[in-house]
Amino acid sequence: MTSSDPRKAEFPPIITAADIVGGRDQVNHVTLSAKHHHIALRFVLRVDSYLSQSRFTVEGFGRLDLQWRVLWSITPETYAYESGPDTPAITDPDTNLIASPSSRTDEIKAQSWQKIINTLAAHADRILS
């Protein structure tokens, strides 16, 4: 993100369709950056068609060792894919249903996966506060 990017100051960062790599493939990747409590953060989603092989983490950049370190991760079993066509439940923040990589549009995936980013951000906030 450039310094003129209005999303840079957002916490938690917001997923857009353009952030999703992989289309309707078996695996989609999302990497978002943010800064919170003066720490550079990286949110990494690896959403696999086999949910158990997915990975959801938030990492912090250590200025002393210049490396990314996992602050928090969510086990993929926390979420479930909806069987059949997408319904509004996958974008409802009060459900554990998320869009699978084979969902029809990246916009729906972005809205759905935002709940994962929000949960990771809440844990990062608690750790860094």
Image: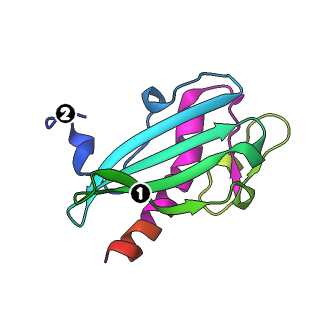
Residue in the picture at 67% in, 45% down: 54
The chief SS type of the magenta part is helix
SS at mark 1 in the image: strand
Find the residue positioned furthest to the left: 4
Q: In which quarter of the image is the N terminus?
A: top left
Q: Residues within 10 Å of mark 2 (few under 14, many from 20)?
A: few
- The answer to which image quadrant residue 116 occupies is bottom right
Query: Is residue 19 shown in magenta?
Result: no
**Placement of the C terminus among the 4 image quadrants:** bottom left
- Is the residue 58 above or below the residue 1 in the image? below
Q: Which residue is drawn at 59% across and 45% down?
A: 112
- Check disc 1: other Cα within 10 Å, few if <14, some if 14-19, many if 20+: some
Chain part drawn in magenta: 96-122
Task: Check if residue 110 falls in the magenta segment.
Answer: yes
Contact, CB < 8 Å: mark 1 with mark 2? Answer: no
| Percent position of residue 56, x then y | 57, 51
- CA gap, disc 1 and disc 2: 23 Å
59 with respect to 82 (left or right): left
Q: Label 2, on which residue?
A: 2
- Which residue: 28% across, 56% down? 65
Q: Is mark 2 on a helix, strand or loop?
A: loop
Q: What amino acid is found at the position of numbered circle 2 in the picture?
A: Thr
Q: What residue type is labelled 1?
A: Arg
Kindly identify which residue carries mark 1.
69
- Location of residue 39 with respect to 51 vertically, above or below: below
Indicate left or right for 112 with 10 as reference.
Answer: right
Q: Identify the residue shown where x is 22% and y is 57%.
A: 63
Closer to us: 78 or 63 = 63
Of the image marks 1 and 2, the number of the one nearer the N terminus: 2
Place of residue 62 in the rendered image (x, y in percent of width and height, measured from the top left):
29, 58
The location of residue 27, given as percent across then percent down, is 66, 30
Q: Which colour scheme is used?
A: rainbow
